[in-house]
Image: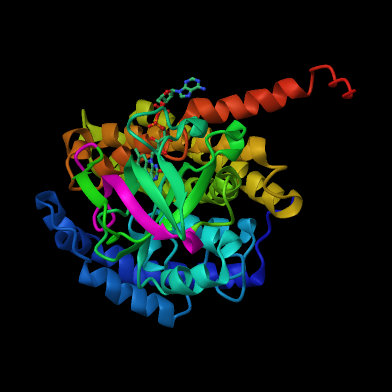
């Protein structure tokens, strides 16, 4: 295994860290002030975000996630990992560099599977962060962790497809610059289960698209992106909006999720490092029962456990990144599933420990830990719950010991 970073990646990391120190970390309170209106339903674009995006783009700290060197940084997963970790220290920082979910996954999807017309219409403005995108797969009425359940219908009618269904947990649905929705739905109900679904592009102002309600996460609105329930009622879109072809929805979903999952994990390691740093600083400065909290042996134990948990997770993520780079995403299936379980659990543990170290202050918004906890907890559900990833791993393990299948005929 070779986890060494290329000179280009080291250069990016140094410039990214300098940008974070100069422009992002000093502006955390200002960002929160600018998005505070979301609590009353105002999802405006914070001027700070637009300003920092322009700076980041000018410094060529832009589209770092995209392996295609023509449109992005052209980095391997191993090279992107430390950059993602740096951005992950501040939850809104990835968008400053146009490296935020779900836009990154949607851009990769359009890049890999979109037609030339779809790319010029939606990928190009996404790469410039002029519009934002949403991915509509999960539905309130069915257990969506089994994607064969997805029930939204996509029916061909002349030169159009007609879409009917209800989605929820659509991230970015409330973003003021939302420009495109990628909707997964059933187009071929009589085909085998994995060939029934398709993905199609829908513009948010198409007649029949309705934002039903906002969905806060533990009370956090996560502006300017937000999450929402979205209804599609007889929405007609041109047939050319279908991505790749009828019945290819699963293939696209699989391709989209591998990189998306490792990016979540890389960012989570950055968030965990931030929580550990906050915790250590607090424990050093607070005194109880005649000595600092840091000198109490319970906290020595907990801080050490957090350090071990973060470092173990990072190595697992790096190994997965290396495997994806050298053997492909399919060969790394077990590892991708494994980090998607391990890393969010680690982050939840580290943030929970940090909250304990802060006492009552930990559950206020004064130190960012409560929001961090909310995001860490949802990470165990987003992009598939832990159980589904464990199922993937277990099935791959069992396969090693099952008798070989008899040849057909
Ligand atoms: C903050 C947030 C953002 C999100 N963003 C998006 C988005 O942008 N687009 C989108 O389409 N979706 C999004 N989601 C939805 C997310 O991907 C789904 O919630 C997730 O895939 C689970 O689907 P579900 O909610 O239907 O749960 P269900 O499928 O109903 O599962 C419920 C529970 O059942 C259990 N379970 C499921 N399968 C098994 C099994 N095989 N064995 C044992 N137990 C099992 C698990 O404990 C699981 O948590 C988001 C969710 C959140 C919370």
Residue at image x 17%, y 41%?
364
Front residue of 246/101: it is 246
Query: Residue placed farthest to the left in the image?
Result: 40
Front residue of 188/269: it is 188
Q: Is residue 55 visible?
A: yes
Q: Is residue 138 magenta?
A: no
Query: Residue placed farthest to the bottom in the image?
Result: 58
Image coordinates of residue 398 in percent, x first then y, are 72, 20
Q: Is residue 225 magenta?
A: yes
Displayed quadrant of residue 115: bottom right
Image coordinates of residue 245 in percent, x first then y, are 58, 54
Residue at image x 60%, y 40%?
336
Front residue of 202/11: it is 202
Q: What's drawn in magenta, residue-wise?
A: 218-241
Colour convention: rainbow
- On screen, residue 194 versus residue 363, left or right, reads right
Image coordinates of residue 89 in percent, x first then y, are 39, 54
Q: Quadrant of ligand 1?
A: top left
- On screen, residue 128 versus residue 329, left or right, reads left
Displayed quadrant of residue 218: top left
* Up/down of 198 relative to 177, above or below: above
- On screen, residue 241 versus residue 141, left or right, reads right
* Up/down of 43 relative to 169, above or below: below
Residue at image x 43%, y 28%?
301
Front residue of 166/56: it is 166
Q: Is residue 281 visible?
A: no
Residue at image x 36%, y 63%?
132
Image coordinates of residue 256 in percent, x first then y, are 55, 50
Q: How many marks?
A: 0
Displayed quadrant of residue 401: top right
Which image quarter is the C terminus in?
Answer: top right
């Amino acid at each position: 295994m070779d986890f060494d970073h290329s000179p280009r990646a080291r250069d990016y990391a140094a410039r990214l860290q300098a940008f974070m120190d100069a422009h992002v970390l000093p502006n955390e309170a200002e960002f929160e002030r600018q998005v505070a209106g979301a609590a009353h339903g105002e999802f405006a674009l914070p001027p700070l975000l637009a300003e920092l995006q322009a700076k980041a783009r000018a410094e060529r700290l832009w589209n770092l996630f995209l392996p295609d060197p023509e449109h992005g940084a052209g980095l391997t997963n191993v090279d992107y990992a430390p950059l993602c970790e740096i951005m992950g220290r501040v939850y809104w920082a990835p968008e400053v560099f146009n490296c935020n979910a779900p836009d990154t996954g949607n851009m990769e999807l359009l890049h890999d599977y979109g037609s030339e017309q779809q790319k010029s219409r939606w990928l190009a403005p996404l790469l410039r962060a002029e519009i934002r995108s949403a991915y509509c797969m999960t539905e309130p009425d069915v257990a969506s962790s089994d994607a064969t359940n997805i029930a939204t219908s996509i029916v061909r009618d002349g030169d159009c497809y007609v879409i009917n269904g209800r989605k929820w947990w659509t991230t970015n649905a409330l973003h003021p610059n939302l420009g495109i929705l990628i909707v997964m739905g059933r187009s071929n109900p009589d085909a085998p289960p994995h060939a029934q679904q398709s993905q199609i592009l829908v513009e948010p102002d198409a007649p029949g698209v309705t934002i039903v309600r906002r969905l806060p996460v533990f009370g956090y609105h996560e502006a300017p992106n937000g999450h929402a329930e979205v209804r599609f009622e007889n929405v007609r879109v041109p047939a050319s909006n279908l991505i790749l072809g009828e019945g290819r929805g699963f293939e696209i979903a699989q391709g989209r999720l591998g990189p998306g999952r490792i990016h979540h994990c890389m960012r989570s390691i950055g968030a965990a490092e931030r929580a550990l740093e906050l915790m250590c600083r607090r424990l050093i400065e607070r005194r109880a029962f005649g000595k600092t909290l840091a000198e109490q042996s319970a906290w020595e134990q907990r801080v050490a456990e957090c350090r071990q948990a973060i470092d173990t997770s990072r190595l697992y993520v790096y190994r997965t990144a290396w495997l994806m780079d050298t053997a492909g995403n399919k060969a790394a299936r077990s590892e991708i599933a494994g980090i998607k379980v391990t890393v969010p659990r680690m982050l939840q543990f580290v943030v929970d420990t940090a909250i304990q170290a802060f006492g009552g202050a930990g559950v206020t918004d004064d130190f960012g830990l409560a929001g961090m906890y909310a995001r860490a907890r949802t990470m165990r559900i987003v992009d598939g719950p832990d159980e589904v990833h464990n199922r993937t791993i277990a099935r791959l393990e069992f396969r090693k010991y099952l008798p070989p299948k008899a040849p057909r005929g």
